[in-house]
Image: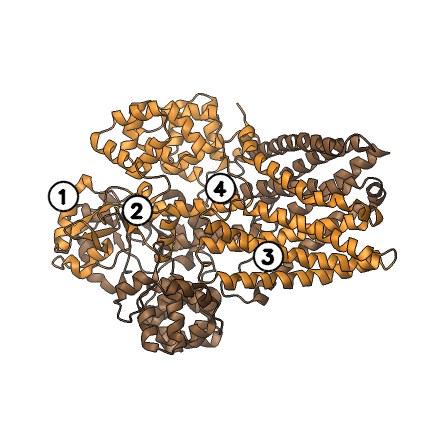
Chain colours: A orange, B brown
Amino acid sequence: MTRDTAELTDDVLDDIPLAKSETPEELEDLALGEDYALNPEYVEMVVDAADSGDSKRLRELVGALDPADVADLMGFLTADYREQIIPLLDPEALGEIISELEDNIREEVLEATPSVTLARALEELDTDDAADVIDDLDDTKRFQVLAAMGETDRAAIETTLSYEDETAGRLMQREFLAAPEFWTVGQTIDHVREAGETLPELFFDVYVVDPTFKPVGAIPISILLRSRRETPLAELMEAVTEIPVDMDQEEVAYIFDKYHLISAPVIEPGGRLVGQITVDDIVEVIRDEAQEDILALAGVSDAGRDASVVEIVKSRLPWLMLNLATATLAVSGVAIFQAEIAQLVALAILMPIVSSLGGNAGTQTLAVAVRALASKELTTANARRIILRELLVGLVNGLCLAVVMGTATYLFFGPADHHDKLAIIVGAALVANIFTAAVGGILMPLALEKMGRDPAVSSSIFVTFLTDFTGFFAVLLIASLLLH
Amino acid sequence: MTRDTAELTDDVLDDIPLAKSETPEELEDLALGEDYALNPEYVEMVVDAADSGDSKRLRELVGALDPADVADLMGFLTADYREQIIPLLDPEALGEIISELEDNIREEVLEATPSVTLARALEELDTDDAADVIDDLDDTKRFQVLAAMGETDRAAIETTLSYEDETAGRLMQREFLAAPEFWTVGQTIDHVREAGETLPELFFDVYVVDPTFKPVGAIPISILLRSRRETPLAELMEAVTEIPVDMDQEEVAYIFDKYHLISAPVIEPGGRLVGQITVDDIVEVIRDEAQEDILALAGVSDAGRDASVVEIVKSRLPWLMLNLATATLAVSGVAIFQAEIAQLVALAILMPIVSSLGGNAGTQTLAVAVRALASKELTTANARRIILRELLVGLVNGLCLAVVMGTATYLFFGPADHHDKLAIIVGAALVANIFTAAVGGILMPLALEKMGRDPAVSSSIFVTFLTDFTGFFAVLLIASLLLH
């Protein structure tokens, strides 16, 4: 068992009163810092209780936390400690905790939990969250858990799983509040009071439907609440933004973000209302997609907080190997010019600067392009204008850098020994490379987007290759022309 | 006037019926693609109407759009076209359109709009959105607009502006629904029906307050709606997550995301309820903060969709100049080893590969660390474990790459002319540099975070410098040791 966290915090810990009679509220105050992140000291208290085998204390400490915080706590512990804690978890909260866990920890917890317990825990969740968990189970366990669930829940989960991953169908809940146009506010409220179980616990809009169950409008329930009982729904309803059940979740997030939606009805191809998506699921999508872009641009996938060294190496080494191949390819041209380098060693010093600056300029353009594509600020409507602007920016940046670096080169190496020509070589190569960076940085993500691929993935390796190659080749080619 | 967009879409446009008798619904269908992004063809229709000076048609085309789409449309047009459209905008929608506009376009629109029109438009907005716009005005215009507003709105905006930028105080609305503990569901609903104007149009929770107006609980209004009229609020209310008015917006977003909040009460230092934050404002914060990280890691700030070449150059050149300086510093060490390079030109070919791979490994580590810090998965509770793991990963990746590249070097250059030693030099330098990348990639963002700085900003330039320097220096140092 590792005790890494302990060593870091022992001295801090002495200042904390450890009387074992705190109320759950006091424990929660101890657990969370002002920023609502888990206190390292609290993690240490859990570790201490686990080490001394004090199950009662452990249950108390974990029980005082919100499911999201329990999930967070699990991420800070090693597998051994988690094993000790899992059986102590409140069955009521278990479903929510599981759906908050990171992938590899979730797998571990799912394996350790009996199928019947799991079935009960998942029945507490919204369909979309329960389906997500079921999807992670191996075939045998999935069969067992579904068999142990109630008929209605099982059917709902199976339908949800029939939609493709990362689509609206997977994000939606199958529970929602719908009412016909001719109902009044009062009738709707009475219906809500009677319907009870068939409605989701939380909902934010009433969807008004026509006789074929197509949504024709929506009313925020705060509007419902403030309107007179006799008002007909048709009078209150506003236009509604419908989400097709097969829409990609990134598109769904774009729509929620753009129109500031709190919930939206999901429709089948025929137009029939089949579910609703709420903004809390969208917050997760927006965060995840943005983080995916950060990692994709850096050429790395996140192996997870609890990943082993081997898992992390597997998530990073392939990219580095690919990079090794392209870098080798890029400098292989240099071999032709060995004579020039031997004659003028300064070239070897200046080449990497030219290629490094090109790489940086390319990364800048890429990041801006990927962001603009993701937010649909860059589309075919303005692509030509943006491309032209980027090329101009590349030219201007290249010229500015060339002047500075050319001057510096001249001052440093002086006029002797062909060194006067060095300044011109470096300057011209820089202009060429920064311009190339602009070309690659804007065209590559646009091309990937047009092909229906993710513009953040694999564009950076291409642009780096391009600027490495151009950097070396331009310096040496211009040198061989000027020096002979 | 540029007509870039026109050329791109002329051929597509021929297929679209242009009869000028569409209903607003038909126009909206023409305007938005299936993905709810603006159709390039629609932008072209607007440009055509503007070119032919057809104000009626222009008003029709723009009027059919949601404010968010009008704001989007503005971003696809040049300033000349915007000038033509601004006076045609529906005063009712103007406020919302302005608050959706990008910064530099917004500035232009604000200048072109009379103060009184602006005052009326802003009165339609929530306090937080109105304050945001007011904050962008120059002093004279701000004074005029505020003077033209109603007393209550002015006071609310001035209070909001007294909070620091990017804090909860700025995000919050001052309108919310609060009720004392002893009220019943029925009393609360009756109060909502009577209160009318003083309540926000949309709200999602009732905050239950004690006699000193401190929030003691919250009830989602869907729960209120489904409960019997005689139920006391105290029976329904759940624990509430309070947001201090001076909390940073990134912290607020973290809390909303973690606990899946739809709205949360904002409290003054004494604990008094002063406002509420709703999730739609948080969606924006989450998206913006993630995009900031992408751009910061790439060393670029977004100058905006409508920025000029000069503005973009200003947003990128300083970073490239800094990079020129550090790259120069990094290779300056190479000058000492000119003799080694002249003796063995192959070194000049291999050095850049070693430094480029180091740069990539560093970027991977950085991206993962920045993401983990942002989501509080990396804190002092597990920092030591994560650092150790990253160093191990660096070592393993370095060894793997060294074996591959060492072998390749040996096969390519063969055993003659000291070339047998090249494989060893390159392999050892790679291990050193990939390990260095791991050290810098994990420690630099942690250090910046500890100093209260943004870990995404300026860590990449440092790590690139570190790996450039180590790459060159390690190759040449090991070479000079082995070759003499």
Q: Viewer-nearest of labels 1 and 3?
A: 3
Q: Check if mark 4 and mark 1 are on a common chain.
A: no
Residue for badge 3: A438
Amino acid on which disc 4 is placed: Lys
Residue pointed to by mark 2: A277
- In the image, what residue type sits under mark 1? Glu
Q: Quadrant of the C terminus of chain B?
A: top right
Report the Cα–Cα distance between label 2 and label 1: 23 Å
Residue contact at pointers 1 and 3, CB within 8 angstroms: no
Whether labels 4 and 3 belong to a single chain: the reply is no
Q: Is mark 3 on a helix, strand or loop?
A: helix
Specify few, some or many for label 3: CA neighbours under 10 Å numbering under 14, 14-19, or 20 or more: many
Mark 2 touches mark 1? (CB < 8 Å): no
Q: Mark 4 — residue?
A: B376
Residue toward you, A151 or A382: A382
Alpha carbon distance from label 1 to label 3: 63 Å
- Residue B230 vs residue A87, the one in the foreground: A87
As drawn, the residue found furthest toward the top would be A53
